[in-house]
Amino acid sequence: MSELLDLARSVCDRAAGKEQIEAFLTHEKTFEARAFGGEIDSVSSAEPRGAGVRVVDGGRVGFSYTTDLSESGLTACYEKARTNANFASEDEAVVLAEAWTRPPPEVSGLSDPAQAGVTAGQKVAFTVALERATKSADARIRTVEDAVYSDSEATIAIATSTGIAGTYSRTDAWGYSVAIAEDGDDTQVGFDFGLAHGLSGLDPDALGRRSADKALSVLGARKIDSARMPVVFDPYTAGQFLGVISSALTGEAVQKGRSLFAGKMDQKVAGNVTLIDDGTIAGAPASGPWDDEGTPTGRTEVITDGTLTSYLYDLVSANRDGTTSTGNASRAGFKSGPGPSPSNMAFDSTGQSREQLLLEAGNAFLVQDFHGVHSGANAVSGDFSVGATGRLIENGVLTQPVKEVTIAAPMLEILSGIVAIADDRRWLPFGGSFGGATTLIAEMTVAGS
Amino acid sequence: MTSRAALATRYPAPVLDHDVIAKVLSHAVDHGAEHAELFVENRGSTGLRLEDRRVEDVASGSDAGAGVRVMAGDKVAYAYTNVLTEDSLLEAAEAARAGLSTSGSGTATDLRQVEPEVRHPVGRPPLDVEMSEKVSAIQAADEAARSAGAEIRQVTASYSDVRQEVLIANTDGLLVRDERTRVRFAVQVVAARGDRIATGFEAPGHSGGFELLEARPPSELGAKAGAKALRMLDARPAPAGEFPVVLAPGTGGVLIHEACGHGLEADTLVKEASVYASRAGERFGSETVTIVDDGTDVGAWGSFGVDDEGTPAQRTVLFDQGVLVGHLSDRRSAEKIGYPPTGNGRRQSYAHLPIVRMTNTYLLPGPDDADEIIRSVERGVYAATFAGGEVNPATGNFVFGMSEAYMIENGEIAYPLRGANLIGNGPAVLGAIDAIGGDFDRKEGVCGKDGQHAPVTNGMSTVLLRRMTVGGTEA
């Protein structure tokens, strides 16, 4: 759809004098279906499109967005961005991306070629099958609160008056279900999801089973006595934890005094593990040839063998630190300007299988779910105090389900406590794309009764 | 004042006349759907953000679109577009009805326009306020916060206004327009001393215009957030264990929202995914406990004239003197449980299907004295600000983090606590309410559900909870 790129270019053609213009346009086709009680409950489809325009003049940047892609709509949008720039503070770090001196990386696996041929009927059938698979996994599954399929087929285009012009397309599909299990007086909820580039990458039976198992596995959970013990994060909670600390790993967060990693460069901040961010991984959810301000993507080692080695940068924050962008500018969509955030971020595995890691843990607490992460985790202060549900591990074997306990420790202590990361990584969308793998932490306080 | 004509140019009203609307609706029910609805939205917004002493973001946007929803039996299909032409709307209607496999022919009643009964006055329309005045406001907050003390490290101040114009029409003949103007101002302050970092946050908002900043001056908000961040630098690790907990006015309302409100949303009740399912008439708290959801509260952040399905905003009693008596619903869930809708069908935008949401949820004031409540506690925790929370509607279990909390010793607030959270169970917490003060206050927030965000208010007075589990790091 080079029509979208032509539109983006046409906006940049309006540049007058010294001003620079960037136009970021998206055109999507989306579909969503929900099932309940063995039948389809709702379907929703749309074709949203829009433009976000930035004007930079003399170190001042203004932004505006519109859903009106007509000539007059785009002109009005440009003019608003132009006017808004007058009210921003002057900042010499503010620039648009320079024209590419080398072509952006070829990133494979962004689209599932089969997805274009998938009918609405097949998507609806998947959703119903997911609901049924979740419900029928076990007699103790009382109800399925949600069973959802969603997909998107998107074209993204960017052009700048500095000479960038690019467009690419991607397809994404995801499904999730929420199972409610009941046994006597005990009720537990289980949630899991699948992430792929098309319907063909999702298995309704396996997904439904996983959601059901998550609920079933904690039936009969009880509080345990407060103690210090080794803790194991499931891939799901490991990914969630990574999502929390990632916001403090951008250069911007450090510059602005809202990072627990400020002043920690070249220092030991974690156990002997390596954390990478890589926007070029084939098929990973946040991959793409360039980031949301047009900088080619790449691979960055953030933590190397436990030592903090790099922050993640977009253009502005890189300029402030006198370095180059790591290709980590991202936007929530055309309605917002870019800011730095991780692409696909994950710890490298230390080589063990999950089973080996559990044996290594010996007697420990396996965290399957955190509760209250958005309030109990603070990436500025590094405080981490959240509710947890999971299982006891005894001699490497999962035993008693546990609920209503709190785990609390400074985040740097948790990172430093990491002794092993299993080879069962999966990508999780916690406000970015995070690789979660079963993770062993030497010791934490588990507060129960 | 800007003339109406000038306003119309800046935010043009949807150019949909009654004929087009009627045509789209008839088209949508052409293949036998029982009900069709058209939702048209035109939204203009401004957002400013200052950080690190710099005005970094100056943004404005315009977003227009329309969605067609058709219903048949238990099923719903929806399609939306942001191209507001007759052809494009007819296409959306066709896409929506294709989502339902029905046959035959439904009917559309002639449209009759009605007016919302409640209006939320806009003193100074944000569109009439110069951008420079909005910029000055965030700078004033920054200035005041930085003056609070030498240990202030970072200040983020933001301002946003939204003017949302909606039109809802359906095959029952309803045609209604509503206008919602909302303004919110937020200041976040980070203070640091050595390795210790603490934050303070203030974020008032309302349904109305720029006059919000007269009632809540940015410099006061900045100073307040700054003082709070500085106070929290002295925080000691929170204890873990069971304690009496005093909830500060306003902020504690999030507990009611999360632990009681969500479980009474009828979509959750229908799916039997709520701990409150089939328990109407049951007593959960003492006679002082009355909880309402009130979308008519004039000027409140979560208010509107009609909801996003055109049902008038209303005040719904959820717990009357301790007894469960109500629920919240949209059209669909109301039909399933056999009651009229309560005006709680809300959507984030035209890109979303309406779902059941709270508006302004309040625990009404009680007979006790707030100071006396604190004096009555020998050793306990004073929860001054919750940072947010999470609840499992099926079990009622919740966890709330406290971004500002204090230890109460011998009836007095002794010292600040960090890393404290509150763990418990919704139905049980109502029973744990031992005293309610008269110092009612509101706190504004944004509630997320099924991937959609909605402005909501939580309100309550000082409340004493007899015994609660506090999660902290000190045994």
Image: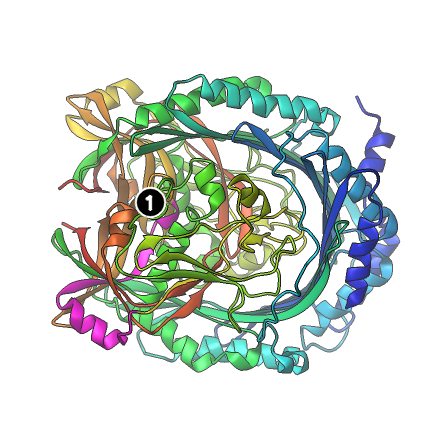
Q: Position of residue A122 (x, y in %)?
A: 60, 82
Quadrant where the C terminus of chain B sits is top left
Give the amino acid at mark 1: Gly
Q: How many marks?
A: 1
Quadrant where the N terminus of chain B sits is top right
**Few, some or many residues within 10 Å of mark 1 (<14, 14–19, 20+):** many
Whether residue B462 appears in magenta in the rendering, the answer is: no
- What residue is rendered at 61% in x and 75% in y? A111
- What residue is rendered at 79% in x and 48% in y? B112
Q: Position of residue B449 (x, y in %)?
A: 49, 53
Q: Which residue is mark 1?
A: A376
- What residue is rendered at 16% in x and 40% in y? B474
Image quadrant in which you'd find residue B206? top right
Left of B285 or right of it: where is B122?
A: right
Image quadrant in which you'd find residue B92? bottom right
**Which region is colored magenta?**
A350-374
